[in-house]
Amino acid sequence: MQIKSLREIEVLKAQHATFCVYFSSPNCGVCQVLKPKLLDFLNETYPKIKVCQVDTAIYPDIAAQLGFYTNPSFIVFLNGQEFLRRSRSISLKEIDESLARPYNLMF
């Protein structure tokens, strides 16, 4: 799902308390390499976390309002609260270690 406004994130917090947002830009090489790996990993390992994306080339204000000023960036909300935030160097192993226990407790 593509996010086009900060309001959409607020709606997601209310409707889908558990979701993540990946911030990237089409002209960012790291973003383009990491994106399919991250999306596949989340869909396979944490299927109940709704995955959303923001194109920061088109909507830089969304990332800036959430305090992200570099690509790629990633944020996870669990029960409507920010749980995990990463920028620039994003490790799938670190995300897995951070999410495994709370995800298994929730689901």
Image (spheres, helix red, strand yellow):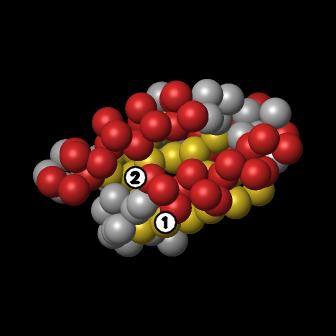
Tell me if 17 is positioned left or right of 64 in this view.
right
Q: Is residue 30 above or below residue 33?
A: below
Asked if residue 92 can be seen in this view, the reply is yes
Q: Position of residue 14 (x, y in %)?
A: 79, 39
Figure quadrant of the C terminus: top right
Q: Residue furthest right?
A: 105
Kindly check if marks 1 and 2 are in contact, taking CB atoms under 8 A apart as contact. no
* Residue depicted at x 73% and y 33%: 16
Q: Secondary structure at mark 1?
A: strand
Q: Quadrant of residue 47?
A: top right
Q: Is residue 54 above or below residue 107?
A: below
**In front: mark 1 or mark 2?**
1
Q: Nearer the viewer, residue 14 or 107?
A: 107
Q: Position of residue 6 (x, y in %)?
A: 56, 50
* Residue depicted at x 64% and y 59%: 98
Tell me if 91 is positioned left or right of 29 in this view.
right
Which of the two labelled residues, at mark 1 and mark 2, occupies the earlier sequence position?
2
Per the model, the C-alpha gap separating discs 1 and 2 is 10 Å
Q: Which mark is residue 25?
A: none
**What's the amino acid at mark 2?**
Phe
Q: Position of residue 27 (x, y in %)?
A: 14, 52
* Residue depicted at x 57% and y 34%: 45
Q: Nearer the viewer, residue 93 or 7?
A: 93
Q: Which residue is mark 1?
A: 86
Tell me if 101 is positioned left or right of 56 in this view.
right
Q: Within 10 angstroms of label 2, few (less than 14), some, or many (20 or more) residues? A: many
Q: Which residue is mark 2?
A: 23
**What's the amino acid at mark 1?**
Arg
